[in-house]
Image: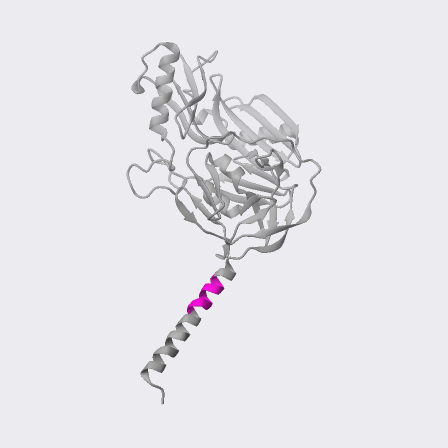
Amino acid sequence: MKTRKTIRRTALTLSLILLFGAFSLTALAAEPTDVTAELRPHVVILVDGAEKDFFNVEGQEVHPLFFNDTHYLPVRAIGELMGRNVNWDQKNLTITLAGSRTTGTVTGKADTDAKTAAVKAQLRPDFTIVVDNTRRTFTDARGDVVHPLLLDGTTYLPIRAIGELMGKDVGWDDPTKTIELTTRESLVTDADSFDQSGSATGSASATAPAGVIGEEQARFIALEKANALVGGDLKKEDVTFHNTRLEWDDGRRIYDVEFYDAATEYDFEIDALTGTVLDFDFDVENFTRPDSSDDEQIGEDRAKAIALDHAGLAADDVSALVCRLDRDDGRMVYEISFRQGHWEYEYEIDALTGAIRECDRDWD
């Protein structure tokens, strides 16, 4: 017959076995694993309609990877697009994306000799990803956890995770082998401000993604700069804001602010993180107020049809078709871009007359 002491000793032993066994399984699960991925230099990456190439810190081009039915993109290059610093903590095996980017966009020479090939990479479940002080884990479309890949010193994340980080929708066009990351369209269009990133927490002040100065501040900075340039005293109520748009440009997040008064048009690009004026234009020649109504404009569908007809293509023949109503030299125009194979087309079409003002075709 077992004594109580023996029973307690046996129970303690079993507990220790189970505890250390759990630690062993956890450690085993976190071990890096050698896997075979596919290097895919032929895959095209479009971010809001603009094709992007990626380079490591040495200026060497890095290409998408394909593993387990998922495309992967390099984390540091994505940090450039997000305007975030990317830090590697060797001791804790942690990659951090946070703060305003302090280094410029890395450029390099295109690796035109790269071919589709099987490569040996490492699956790294032991890597931790921290974005804006929040530890992040990622899942695939089935809800299964996915981990970073490591290849030749470059860390890759699945394209679905990249979309989550950038607040963009991810699409795949198989005929052209194109991955598209596009800004999500807002479900609600009647509001004073919008946040597409999911960073809002219910607070009334959460009107812009974390770290971004916000539309009102961008407009204030643009007005102050305009007054400094022309020696005026413009106030908010003196002008009409035609556009205040948050977008990406050369790896930075910027506000494109456009407004006009009775005789002058102003156009500013402002760093969305620091508030620095990056570029400006004012007093455009032949500027006229864009007072035409929507009924007088030809519309996006007609503008697209004009561009496609001029190019000798049908809508089914092209990919990454983007159409945006804008103003250029005082005229309302449709800016249209699309791709057909390795050809990239760009058109500028008068929004009132349908006349083609500019067109360009480049072999990529």
The image quadrant where one finds the C terminus is top right
On the question of residue 234 being in view, the answer is yes
For image coordinates 33% across by 85% down, the residue present is 3
Q: Position of residue 314 (x, y in %)?
A: 63, 36
Q: Quadrant of residue 217?
A: top left
Q: How is the image coloured?
A: one colour
Residue appearing at x 47%, y 22% in the figure: 327
Residue 198 lies, with reference to residue 212, above or below; the image says below
Question: Is 34 colored magenta in this rendering?
Answer: no
Between residue 120 and residue 73, name the one nearer to us: 120
Looking at the picture, does residue 240 appear above or below residue 339?
above
Instruction: For residue 262, say whether it is visible.
Output: no
Q: Is 350 rendered above or below residue 180?
A: above
- Work out which quarter of the rendered image holds the N terminus and state it: bottom left
Q: Nearer the viewer, residue 118 or 311?
A: 118
Q: Nearer the viewer, residue 173 or 230?
A: 230
Q: Classify residue 67 as left or right of residue 19.
A: right
Residue range of the region highlighted in magenta in the rendering: 19-26
**Closer-to-camera residue (358/215):** 215
